[in-house]
Amino acid sequence: MTQRPHEHSERSVKPAPLFERPLLFISFFTGIRGNCPAEWADDKIRVLEASGRETVVLTGMGSHVTNRPGVRYVSVPSPSWNDYKEEVKELKAGGENVPLGMHLFMPLAFVFGNIIDYVLRKVTKGVSAGRWSWLITALPVAMWLKLRHGARDVFCTGGPTSAHVVGGAIVRLNGGRLFCEFQDPLLGATMTRSSMTRRISARIEAWLARRSTRVVYVTQEAARLARERNPGHARQIVGVYPGAWQFVPPVTPGERGKGEVFEFLHLGTLYGSRNLDLFFDALDALHEEGFELARAVRVVNLGAVYCETAPRYLARPDFQSLDALDRVDALRRARQASCLMLVQHTDERSRETIPYKTYDYLNLGLPVFGLLNNDELSALIESHGGHTAQADDPESIKAALRCCLTAQAEARVERPVVDERLDISRQFLQILEGADAAR
């Protein structure tokens, strides 16, 4: 167990606390660049810090974190040998020295961790992302933190489901209020898993629903399906759009005049069925039809391109591939675009999820063009002035692309009214509503 040192804050005045009792926040991932579950958790910790809520964060050893006024981190390694190697690799990749405790922990992780990994592979019939072995080390530390700091409210998010189980166990043993947020469904309708893993996941979901004050899914569809699976605890299960922290100011109307190039920018990795094949087919079809606005299009991908058709993309004069940037730098670059692209897989995996970068996009106030496989996400994008198409339908993509370019040319793109459902502070504190009453 490692407690991170304090970092000097640039703030001269610490905000008055709004709550007397601290919150115990559990997430295996925090502070890791390019790791979506970590960025998701980090944004919520920023909300807690801004609200004055004292917070104790229990996280994995591979997280890059530093204590701040009101926010204390405790890092705990996983005894799994596979997890141990990943944590050490992540620490080194972040330029940190591996703590002495991690070196001393290595023989235990190698001997017993390999046994744990073997058992888990047999039980789950494959490699699980649940980080289940973390339960062994995180559970006693979580209990100690809860007692040491007098925390009554426990918030768990992930990412790895081990965080939720740790929270459920300590609330079961010591009481309090449990808030579980699933960034992805624990038991998605379209997830391909062994029958054993599905049965285990169903039991965990039901157990957490029974123990929780609130179980949060991040789409209405995922919440609806969870309520169907757990009708006796339907009142605790809600769907809440998380929103994202506002790192850079939004683009204001009239900030940029019309340019000669209309830039579509995609942040992230393109691979597998999440690709631009049909988008370029639609764009080429508009060229052939003589649609002049299509000639002004340039597509930029800020991140890796692993598609089989990547050489075809790179050979196009209207495509540019740029190296990935830190999240804030990437958002600053995104402000220069004409339109932001959101690309989902063309298979069923996208039905119950919304990519977290959607909220970063909407915070920027730019139009969003989505190649989607999710009706709920399509409605959200269109309600904010964006354009969407069915990801596997070339005609749908061509029609949406024509509409998007025409709207821009006719100056019909306006910044939408601020949607309170996407205000991360409102959304997160809403989940914890009434927490101070349970002191």
Image: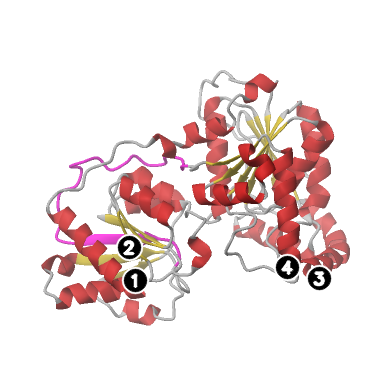
Could you tell which of marks 4 and 2 lies nearer the N-terminus? 4
Residue beneath disc 2: 389
State the image coordinates of residue 156 (x, y, percent, origin top left).
Answer: 66, 42
Q: Which residues are magenta?
A: 243-269
Residue beneath disc 1: 393
Q: Is residue 249 magenta?
A: yes
Could you tell which of marks 4 and 1 lies nearer the N-terminus? 4
Could you tell which of marks 3 and 4 lies nearer the N-terminus? 3
State the image coordinates of residue 298 (x, y, percent, origin top left).
Answer: 24, 66
Sort mark 4 into few (<14), some (14-19) or many (20+) by Cα contacts within 10 Å: few
For badge 4, the amino acid type reads: Ser
For badge 3, the amino acid type reads: Lys
Which of the two discs, 1 and 3, sits closer to the camera? 1
Q: Are marks 4 and 2 in contact (CB under 8 Å)?
A: no
State the image coordinates of residue 389 (x, y, percent, origin top left).
Answer: 32, 62
Vertical side of 272 occupied by 180: above or below: above
